[in-house]
Amino acid sequence: MPQQKEAFKLVADNRKAYHDYFVLDRLEAGLVLTGTEIKSAREGRVQIRDSYADVVNGEAWLMNSHFSPYSHGNIFNHEPTKKRKLLLHRREIDKLTGKALEKGLTLIPLKMYLKHGLLKCELGICRGKKEHDKRAATKEKEQESEARRAMSLRNSRHLNE
């Protein structure tokens, strides 16, 4: 029986984005890549921590992402931090343009993953968090973990009795 390709493989995750921004909407986009870029991505050598997306002249671009040079590449290896074109439908680009013009909204890549052999980027339309929002989120997360820990202790005591 032939082995099926893995449907979804996470390549890069931008966890910092969830800490620094409120994610209002999500959008999936493809990328225009060269051969060495996709090979580097399949090895998981992509970093999107400080990257963002922008719409320039009616085209969406991923800026500041880092694709490490492919280890078996030759003199035609790619430049690690060049801007890369995002593949979106015209109505999606128009929606992003309208959202990007709103004050305080920005386009942040949240994840990069391989989907049926193609590299996809999940973009988030985000609003920046203020310092007090970050503190509240951290406090809420700590309270949730304490409650979970207390419940697990309670359940383990009942099992031992």
Image: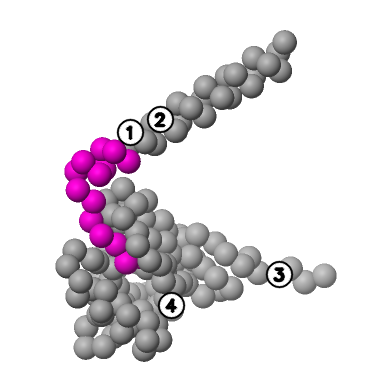
Can residue 95 be seen here? The reply is yes
Which quadrant holds the N terminus?
bottom right
Amino acid type indicated by mark 3: Gln
Q: Is residue 160 above or below residue 126?
A: above
- Closer to the chain start, of discs 2 and 3, is 3
The picture quadrant where one finds residue 56 is bottom left
Residue indicated by mark 2: 143
Residue indicated by mark 1: 139
Residue indicated by mark 4: 30
Can residue 61 be seen here? The reply is no
**What is the x, y in percent for residue 117?**
56, 73
Q: CA distance from mark 2 to mark 4?
A: 38 Å
Give me the residue at 51% from left, 75% from top. 118
- Closer to the chain start, of discs 1 and 3, is 3
Q: CA distance from mark 1 to mark 3?
A: 44 Å
Bounds of the magenta span? 124-137
Answer with left or right where residue 159 lies relative to residue 67: right
